[in-house]
Amino acid sequence: MNNIFLAPDKEKNYQSYMVYALAIIWLMVTGLIVFIEFFYFPQLWSRWVLLMSITLFIAAFNLTLNHFGRTRTASWSLTVMLWLYITIPCYSAGGIFAPGILSQMSVVLTAGFLLGRRGGLIIGLLTIATDFVLAYLEVTGHLPAATVVHDPISRWFSAIIPFGTVLVLQYYAINHLRTSLITLQRQIIKRKEAETVKDQKVHDLREREKELKDYKYALDISSIVAISDVDGSFMFVNENFCKISKYSPEELLGKQHSVLWSGYHPTEYFTELGNAMHQGKFYRGEFCNKAKDGSLYWVDTTIVPFLNEEGNVYQYMSINRDITRKKEALEKLRASEERYKSIIAVSNTGAWEYDLDTQRVWYSAQYFAMLGMDRPDGVWEDTQGMSWVERLHPDDREGAVKIFDDFLMGGTTELYESFFRMRHQNGDWVWIWSRARRLHDKNGNITNVSLGTHTDISERIKAEEKIRESEQLIKKITSQVPGDTYMFEIEESGQTNIIFCNRGTDRLNHSHNPENPATDPTKIREIVHEDDKVKFDDAMRTAWLTGTIISFQYRVVINNHVSWRWMQAVSEKSKNGKVLWYGAISDITPLVDYIVSIEQIIFDIAHVIRRPIASMMGITALISDNEFSEEEIKELSEKLHLISDEMNKFILELNRVYQEKRGNTALNIDISSLIDERNSLFN
């Protein structure tokens, strides 16, 4: 009840404030009058109590209506009750309570002020009608006589109510008019300001709306977007979302995110996501999803919660970015790193990185391991990067440092390469093959950072030493062979490419152009006799086609001297699939010369000696078939003697020539035992 006596806000609702003010004023003025009347007419105390009770009821009733927002109803109720409050006692009490002109004016003004023009007109008409009725009652004598004779003081007090009402209404009317004008002016200014602000806000809202549309368009074009409710069911998916998931919008809307789960992530992976969602916080993470066709794809996801006015989440927006290629690249990089580490671990290769500006060197653990030190990746004990120099072999130090300095200062992009020995922890010397390149920045410019490797090639050096020893041994052996030893390959055209060649002891091999035939294979064909070149090419081409053993003789011309060669070779397929030929070329000129001399002797025997023998056989046949005289026989004997003498001279000449040819040949063979055995041929 205390709240109904609180004054309403005058600025917000002026009429409610006036109902409140008039009710309070009537209550206070009536209370003052009742107090004065009770002082002068104590015998009418019951009437004063009734009057005060009615006044309190009117005030409480109308204040209650006004408090609960029924201002219009309270205005009518207050006006009517005041009118009845003044009029009704006129008929019952007469005299003192008869409404005068001022009382009637106060009621009409109250009605006009509270109810407006129509309300004031209605109350005014009722007041006129009541006056006519009152006049009629007075004329007819039906109006009761006044109970109390008014004295001047009571009349003055009776006039306080209407007069005070008029003054109050006049004050509030003028004040209200002034306040209304000021308020109206303020409202006009505020309205203009509000309209300006409104126009600006409308403009800002339009700009904001356009900006949001641009953002939404850019987001839809560049990102994979989905909106879901608090249960995780899809409410919206954009075109990019459908494209990467291979689902249509109809297949996704209303479905939960679990339709995309790939099973790649463990359950614990989603714990942080769930906590962020329950707390209404955004979450960012990477997820592997499964598309409709079963393929997997990776997205970088940012989930943003939308909160209502109560601060509760009512939907989520997920903004995704396709990182499948990035993940594949990272996986390839990881696999490459693993392969690199594995290769480094099993290949006796250590990595290092040198910064020329800071003079610091980073070494891998394998770098230390090949020198017998158990250390993790990191920097050596010094800051100058020169500890490797201290471990260099004294014979290699100067050359190795010079090569490295030339590489650093030269600004070249060529590969740095150097071979040297470094001291192992156990005191042995380790052969190192060092290689490096200068790194480039993002613009392609050479930096002062070099990345390189150290490879332990000690075993390779030992193997190469053994190979060199074997080669030297083979060269010593083949150098004593009376001919050339070769390793070569044959092309389809028949041309030979010499891979290995070692010249033997044959003097003719060292009397012509000493160029290495391996550098120019055409040199071999150039010395072949012109009549044997086709034969040489055909033999090589046949060997390339069939892979059969090569064995043929041909002539070569060296320093205008013709000599004979015998080439023999067998084929073998190498590990890389090439067919290599291994063989030797022997100088068979002495043998050919010897054979030619034998053939010449045989020819001479067959053609020259046969003629006297034929004559001798003819004479002896003639003697045996006929009977001759002594003189005739003697004559025939002389002829036989001449023929025998001619034949003896020829045999002596043949023996002389044969002995001369035997002396010229390089063959040093004792065939005397064979000659003695030839007697058996004539047995």
Image (cartoon, grey):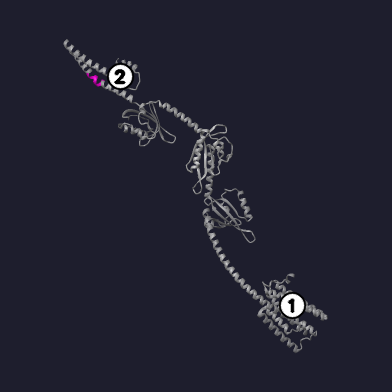
Residue in the picture at 54% in, 59% down:
215
Residue 26 marker: 1
Q: Dot 2 lies on which element?
A: helix
Residue assigned mark 2: 659
Q: Dot 1 lies on which element?
A: helix
Q: Residues within 10 Å of mark 2 (few under 14, many from 20)?
A: few
Q: Which span of residues is magenta-colored?
A: 605-611
Q: Amino acid at mark 1?
A: Trp
Above/below status of 83 relative to 384: below
Magenta stretch: dominant secondary structure: helix
- Residue 623, how many percent across, how many down? 19, 13
Which is nearer the eye, 344 or 54? Answer: 344
Q: Quadrant of the C terminus?
A: top left
Asked if residue 215 lies left or right of residue 7, the reply is left
Residue 204 falls within the magenta-colored stretch = no
Q: Amino acid at mark 2?
A: Gln
